[in-house]
Amino acid sequence: MEAPPTNLESPLYRLSTSFQRVAAAFFASSSLCFFVGKMNAPDRFELFLLGEGEKKITETPFTAMSNTSDFLFKKEDHTLGNLITEYLKQSRHILMAGYKVAHPNVPEVFIRIQTDGTITPKEALVDACKDLISSFGHLGREFTREHELRRMVAAGEQQQGANGGI
């Protein structure tokens, strides 16, 4: 997979290249130099960029249990799996919600949802995602508001200090 273009002026890119130089110097001077470039880990971009034609979420009805579906989330990990399942468990329509990550090097999360039949597992998942997006939007606005207030207070205190406390 081709890496996305990098901005050579970005601080993250400069930090990354500096780290690579330090790591290369360390490994070149040690007896562990044969490990460089041969780690058992996927390319960083393969962990979050979808391939051509790859679907983010697939649903498979689980026929062994009524009102149950399995969802496979590509390019996700424990963070999203735990967040969604714990939120789903708070709903009165959810009988069971659980997730698993098959292997740490495979960025896929498997989520199984069973409902009481009043809503489908897909509807429950969509509702949970909408609610979580709304909650995080509210959290982001509150964080920004608090940050701006603290910045104004700090600027006022700094101005008072420059005026001799008057």
Image (cartoon, rainbow, N blue to C red):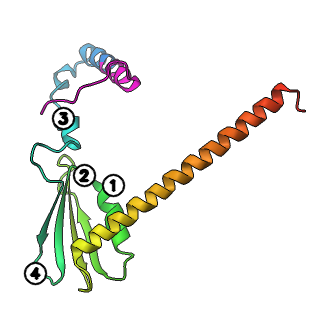
- Residues rendered magenta in the picture: 1-20
Q: Nearer the viewer, residue 48 or 139?
A: 139
Disc number for residue 76:
2
Q: Are marks 4 and 2 in contact (CB under 8 Å)?
A: no
**In terms of sequence position, does the residue under pointer 4 or pointer 2 come before the other?**
4
- Is the residue marked by circle 3 packed among few (<14), some (14-19), or many (20+) residues within 10 Å? few
Residue on which the image places disc 3: 43
Determine whether the residue tagged by mark 3 lies in a helix, strand or loop. Answer: loop
**Amino acid type, label 2:** Glu
Does 76 appear above or below 6?
below
Q: Are marks 2 and 1 in contact (CB under 8 Å)?
A: yes
Query: Real-space Cα distance between discs 3 and 2?
Result: 15 Å
**Amino acid type, label 1:** Thr
- Is the residue marked by circle 2 packed among few (<14), some (14-19), or many (20+) residues within 10 Å? some
Q: Nearer the viewer, residue 135 or 61?
A: 135
Determine whether the residue tagged by mark 2 lies in a helix, strand or loop. Answer: loop
* Residue 14 drawn at (x, y percent): 36, 20
Res 79 → quadrant: bottom left
